[in-house]
Image (cartoon, rainbow, N blue to C red):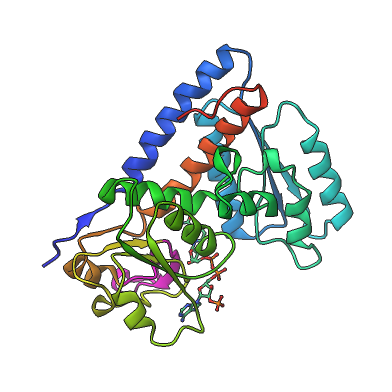
Amino acid sequence: RGTARVIDGKATASRVLEWVTARASELERAGTRPGIAVVIVGDDPASKVYVASKARAAEACGFHSITHRLPDATAQADLLALVGQLNGDPAIHGILVQLPLPGQLDASRVIGAISPEKDIDGFHALNAGRLWSGGGSDAFVPCTPAGAMLLIEQVHGRELAGLEAVVVGRSNIVGKPMAALLLAANATVAVAHSRTRDLREVCRRADILVAAVGRPRLIEGDWIKPGATVIDVGINRVEAPELGDGRTKLVGDVDYAAAVDVAGAATPVPGGVGPMTIAMLMANTLASAARSVGLATPR
Ligand code: NDP
């Protein structure tokens, strides 16, 4: 029991960050210091934690990093004006507007206002379109699915021909780009969602199962094909009575304890996909800075 290989996202993310740091310092010696601007509107506690860790990672990579903190009641026009200013700032190569935004703001308009050349989250429609149309090295790929692909590569390599992949979840930030990347790697891809009939049977087909749902431990052990690779994107905070004092803990969308008895390889939560997201964000910023001076994307 418990025989699945544990895919270590934390170690992989540190290797990516080390590589980014080394490339960033070469680029800086050649005259271009990568710069990132993070914008947060309001004081959603989870968003504040994410934004702080992005800024910390950027500084650790040697990037120029600024965080713009705007009040909850910020008007759409003011946010768009800030995005416009950052689009024109030559010291900034990556712009990230932390989601979700307060209700008065239209996230898709704000994302659409970010210059596609600085859209390190890869959420702009142009980058999403490039990803789906095989638009080559110029597309910014959303960080969480890009990080998940690096973890899949550790098990299967880059070529997924002949493998069936099932992605549970179809959000624009995780599920859909994940499906596009798996397809580009020649997997046979199914995308499941809340209207899928008999999700268990669909999941059981998967050689590679990616869960990006946001439902704690939705995917049970007997939904997993023996030997499959299980990538758990979910981050869910649940009560942890075993820890006492009304404490909570993070769990994924997969019942990990059950999954490790069935799967061939699996990502834990925390320590799996989570750390990869920020590492890939830094890699995207580095790539953007390199492109801004006409250099090829570092590999
Ligand atoms: P969304 O809420 O945007 O999307 C969830 C998707 O899951 C939807 O497509 C929804 O279907 C589907 N879904 C919901 N309930 C079920 C169900 N019972 N059965 C099948 N499908 C279902 O979430 P995100 O994609 O933004 O995030 C997913 C998870 O990943 C969350 O836990 C989030 O915290 C985590 N996350 C982790 C990141 C990381 O860095 N590791 C980064 C981003 C997210 P439908 O479309 O039909 O509604």
220 falls in the magenta region: no
Location of residue 223 (image quadrant): bottom left
Query: Bounds of the magenta span?
Result: 233-254
120 to the left or right of 212: right
Indicate the position of residue 212 as horizontal and vertical percent values: 46, 66
- Is 234 a magenta residue? yes
Where is 99 relative to 80, above or below? below
Vertical arrangement, residue 64 with respect to residue 206, above or below: above
Residue 67 in view of the camera: no
Q: Residue at x 79, y 44 (%)?
A: 83
Up-down relation of residue 49 to residue 190 (above or below): above
Work out whether residue 171 or residue 181 is closer to the camera in this orientation and state it.
181
Whether residue 85 appears in this view of the structure is yes
Residue 289 point in image, percent of width and height: 62, 28
**Residue 45 in the image: above or below residue 202:** above
Residue 28, horizontal then vertical, whole percent: 58, 17
Residue shown at 73% from the left, 53% from the top: 111
